[in-house]
Amino acid sequence: MTHPTPLPTATASTPEAIPVTNPLRAPEDYRLPRIAGPSVLVIFGVTGDLSRKKLMPAVYDLANRGLLPPGFGLVGFARREWDAQDFAQVVHDAVKQHARTEFKEEVWQQLLEGIRFVRGEFDDDEAFDRLHQTLRELDESRGTGGNHAFYLSIPPDNFETVVSQLKRHGMAEDRQGHWNRVIIEKPFGHDLTSARQLNAVVSQVFPPESVFRIDHYLGKETVQNMLAFRFANQMFEPIWNNNYVSNVQITMAESIGIGGRAGYYDGIGAARDVIQNHLLQLLALTAMEEPNSFEAAQLRAEKQKVLAATRPPADIAAHTARGQYLAGWQGGKQVNGYLDEDGIAPDSITETYAAIRVEIDNRRWAGVPFYLRAAKRMPRRVTEVALQFKPAPHLPFTAAQTAGLGVNSLEMRIQPDEGITMRFGAKVPSTQMEIRDVSMDFNYGGSFTETSPEAYERLILDVLLGDPPLFPLQQEVDLSWQILDPILENWESSGKPEGYAPGTWGPASADAMIGRDGFTWRRP
Ligand SMILES: NC(=O)c1ccc[n+]([C@@H]2O[C@H](COP(=O)([O-])OP(=O)(O)OC[C@H]3O[C@@H](n4cnc5c(N)ncnc54)[C@H](OP(=O)(O)O)[C@@H]3O)[C@@H](O)[C@H]2O)c1
């Protein structure tokens, strides 16, 4: 393929020209910006929530940071009666409203030159011919190099139709020096069987190295920092095991209800929505052994190893809990119960609170329970991983002196207030010995001048670079479902979840569940 206007950075910035592209860089190249090579991003489902709030703004932010090449194209595919200008206006509005970085007219104008729109239904052959034609035109006019990434930001039941169309219309195969990649969003199925079916469909068309599964938590700076924190320092790893850690609590709490997402959420619930993907990925990063390097193969191998050693509870009734939020008051406002939300069946048994206890069968973690909980209508929004430590084996103090001493803990806050807190006892200043809990904080805002990029910026850039470490493999997806499936089957035959008041930390059964082990939930 010829490029009439080869652009200055295109050659130097092809993926092949980037020497090392992994989360922790070699010291000699960490200052080099990782700039994508010539390429086109095609978004299916461009009218959707994800595309408007995250994907289109992330593309602009990358352009604004100088990380997209001049030879870049953005194609929207949707069934709306739009022309190219209508679509450009939609992108413009999304960028203005949701982009992280400042709006600059010159950046927008350059992006605009590569924006195209293709109207059509997913089963419309002519629309896919038009898409192919549009890609050829961009490759010629913008020098996008025949490299195309197809983002399926659509309901998963449409994946098969779209990937089959891409194959049928000749847009799936890599040709000499040019690539075609597909990006799929969670949920990756709703159980092990459907996840495997979904994968079979995608892998008939795209080889494994061309499939990028997005779990956007892995694109977060705070999640990647877990690797830096654990493996770049000497002082934490010696205590990162069952000699010192009593339990680990991984929490994803949202203060909102399901909003307008009934169609998506009902029948899915908290465990499938976030425990299967985000929370089990956080568990893997917390518990895995040190990888030989941060190249994709090594990182994924360690994550798989620890997920394979993670086992669901034998007594599911005793070691899991689920709930559904009730109507009530939260933050001074009256809110609906889950069953009163628009579009929810009055007899729905979908859980909006899920807590599970798992154990990891290996030398490092034997005997340490990992508690994972995800819920809506909690008192506050927070995602964190907290390691709680065993008490000191001996306290040379009286009980009164240590009455204010809590549990030593280390808390990695993924969002918001991104940072790390350590909690330990310290002497209260006085003439007496009295010990009380204090905390020591690291927070991103106070320590770095750079603001963190959005997860989708990092992940879209990595797809365009062909850099795979932050994308889970199908094996990880399968292992996660193997942990969750027995729990979900049990829940489906266990009737209604327990109600909990909005703005509280969940149902009483969740407290009972962790209480059986002698622990209590953190109230972050
Ligand atoms: N929203 C999030 O924050 C989020 C987070 C993680 C993962 N995801 C996943 O990302 C994907 C997109 O999510 P979303 O929230 O953006 O969904 P959404 O708001 O429901 O949007 C779905 C998109 O798919 C299009 N679509 C649906 N059926 C179609 C059909 N038969 N033919 C053509 N287009 C069709 C819709 O087009 P119309 O406008 O024409 O209907 C819309 O553009 C889903 O798989 C979701 O599970 C979303």
Image (spheres, grey):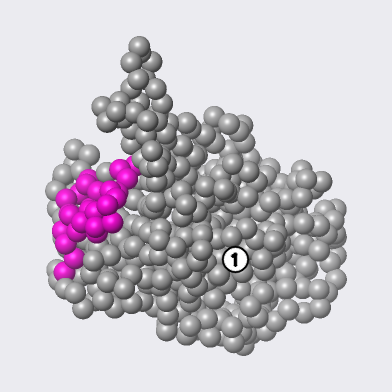
The answer to whether residue 322 is visible is yes
Is 517 inside the magenta-drawn segment? Answer: yes
Q: How many marks?
A: 1
- Name the residue beneath numbered marker 1: 302
Q: Position of residue 394 (x, y in %)?
A: 38, 38
271 on left or right of 200: left
* Residue depicted at 48% across the width and 76% down the height: 478
- Residue reaching furthest to the top: 431
The residue shown at (39%, 51%) is 246
Query: Compared to 334, does 482 lie above or below?
Result: below
Q: Is residue 460 magenta?
A: no
Which quarter of the rendering shows the C terminus? top left
**Residue 84, how many percent across, how many down?**
58, 62
> Mark 1, residues whose alpha carbon is within 10 Å: few (<14), some, or many (≥20)?
some
Residue range corresponding to the magenta coloring: 496-524
Image quadrant in which you'd find residue 432:
top left
